[in-house]
Each structure stands twice: as C-alpha cells, then as structure tokens.
Image: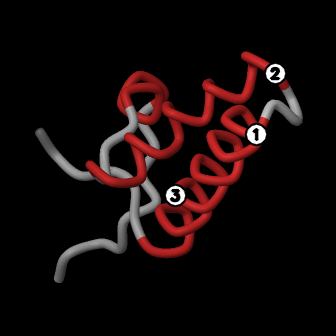
Amino acid sequence: MKFNVGGLDRILRIIVGIVLIALAVTGTIGVWGWIGIVPLVTGLFKFCPLYSIIGISSCPMKR
C-alpha cells in the first residue's frame, strides 16, 4: 500500500474524525457523526482509496 495522504491533510482528517465521533457519542449530531470513522482511519493509515482512484496524492514527492 502506497501512502497518499500527508502533512496537513492527515492532521485535518484526524481532527475532523475525532470531532465527528465525539459529537456522535454525546448525541449532538446523531448517528451520522459515526461517518467520522472514515477520515480518522484514512488519516491514521495515511492512505485514502478515493485518492488512489482519482490519482492524486497530498504526500510530498520523494527526491
């Protein structure tokens, strides 16, 4: 598996995922908050399947 999520993109995904899950747990936004699992997992594993399909990457280029 090749990494395609890097830097700021990764940090934002993890933060958004945690916030959405926390809001779901507290009942603030309901069941839809559990969708936060997706950005959290993609941020933690540094891999986004959608990025692979589209052919983009936010990882810095290797020299």
Q: Earlier in the sequence, mark 1 or mark 3?
A: 3
- Where residue 26 sits: x, y (%)? 76, 39
- Placement of the C terminus among the 4 image quadrants: bottom left
In this view, the residue farthest toward the right is 28
Classify mark 3: helix, strand or loop.
Answer: helix
| Residue topped by disc 3 | 14
| Residue topped by disc 1 | 26
Q: Looking at the image, which is closer to me, 49 or 17?
A: 17
Q: CB under 8 Å between callouts 2 and 3?
A: no
Q: CA distance from mark 1 to mark 3?
A: 18 Å
Give the image quarter of residue 62: bottom left
Give the image quarter of residue 15: bottom right
Residue located at (50% from left, 31% from top): 38
Checking the image for residue 10, the label placed there is none
In this view, the residue farthest toward the top is 31
Q: CA distance from mark 2 to mark 1?
A: 8 Å
Q: Nearer the viewer, mark 1 or mark 3?
A: 1
Q: Earlier in the sequence, mark 2 or mark 3?
A: 3
Classify mark 1: helix, strand or loop.
Answer: helix
| Residue topped by disc 2 | 30
**Within-10-Å neighbours for mark 2: few <14, some 14–19, many 20+:** few
Callout 1 amino acid? Thr
Position of residue 11 relative to residue 44, above or below, is below
